Image (spheres, rainbow, N blue to C red):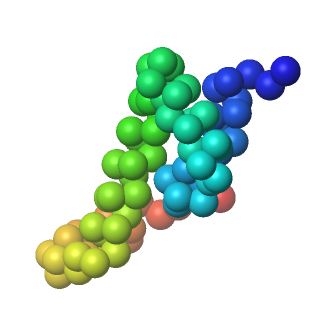
Amino acid sequence: MIDPCDRCEEVLQPYLDRELTEAERLEAESHLDVCSYCRKRYTFEVELRRYVRQVVIEPMPAALKARLADLARETPLEA
């Protein structure tokens, strides 16, 4: 028998993408209703997706780009 949290992890991305069957969706929602760990994971993924969408559409201010370039020159990456 598969662990319910493992199953939830397996279907989390398809759940967020609305790619599950109705039965799978109900199973995932049922688990999220009773498991605080998986609910936190779900909330994190929702917020992460929201952040990524925002970053993609909002241009980076020129001052921030310049500061990041300065930091990159000041602190080279080590191999």
- Up the image or down, 17 lies above or below 32; here it is below
Q: Residue drawn at (50%, 35%), measured in percent from left and top?
A: 29
| Horizontal and vertical percent position of residue 18 | 53, 58
- Up the image or down, 59 lies above or below 50; here it is below
- Horizontally, residue 8 falls left or right of residue 68, namely right
Q: Residue drawn at (42%, 30%), measured in percent from left and top?
A: 40
Figure quadrant of the C terminus: bottom right
Residue 70 visible at all:
no
- In the displayed image of the protein, which residue is found farthest to the front? 22
| Horizontal and vertical percent position of residue 62 | 17, 81
Q: On the image, which quarter does residue 69 sit in?
A: bottom left
| Depth order, front residue of 73/1 | 1
| Depth order, front residue of 63/11 | 11
| Horizontal and vertical percent position of residue 49 | 40, 57
Q: On the image, which quarter does residue 10 sit in?
A: top right
Total marks shown come to 0
- In the displayed image of the protein, which residue is found farthest to the right? 1
Figure quadrant of the N terminus: top right
- Up the image or down, 2 lies above or below 55; here it is above
Q: Residue drawn at (44%, 29%), measured in percent from left and top?
A: 39
Residue 43 visible at all:
yes
